[in-house]
Image: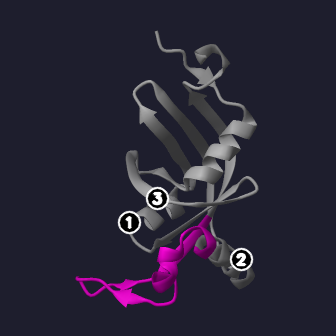
Amino acid sequence: MLDIDEMSSKEIQELLQQVRQGHFGCVFEGHPYVLPMHYSLQDSDIYIFTTVGMKTKYIDTNPEVCLQVEEVGDFQDWRSVVVNGRAERLTEQPDIDRAMQLVKEHNPTLSPAINRTWIDSLGRSQVIAIYRIQPSEMSGRTTEGISSR
């Protein structure tokens, strides 16, 4: 039988620092929306970089969000963290600049997108948005815990 253990706060922080991508969830008018998302972590705050569109509309309407992160070796070897919190869109330039530096450090592939605004195939301007998620609750489960050994 597979033992599943609770992760400590330290283990949760380590996994969040290590993985840097997960599944981001938000809700709009009772409808859930989940998508893959890169993130950056500083202290306990989580930062996400995106473009203005459906998810920003959802987050701005209902800032209660969720991030799920996992590391899976196989069906019997995995760790998973769920972070619930409140997302706040950064609007002050010093906050945006600090967050952008953090995002670039953790995901350099975003640098071209960060430095320009572009037009999508429908002629819409793609404008960036950065959110800070302040966790209200974090939990983690693992098959690598003490009772699993």
Residue located at (55% from left, 19% from top):
4
Identify the residue at the far left of this view. Answer: 121
Q: Which residues are magenta?
A: 104-131
N-terminal label among 1 and 2: 1
Mark 3–mark 2 CB contact (< 8 Å): no
Q: Quadrant of residue 118?
A: bottom left
Q: Which mark is residue 5?
A: none
Where residue 64 appears, as percent x and y from the top left, is 57, 50
Q: Which residue is mark 2?
A: 98
Tell me the amino acid under the disc marked 2.
Arg
Residue located at (53% from left, 48% from top):
67
N-terminal label among 3 and 1: 3
Q: CA distance from mark 3 to mark 2?
A: 19 Å
Q: Which residue is mark 1?
A: 54
Tell me the amino acid under the disc marked 1.
Met
Q: Which mark is residue 37?
A: 3
Q: CA distance from mark 3 to mark 1?
A: 14 Å
- The answer to whether any part of residue 136 appears in the image is no
Tell me the amino acid under the disc marked 3.
Met
In terms of secondary structure, where does tag 1 sit?
A: helix
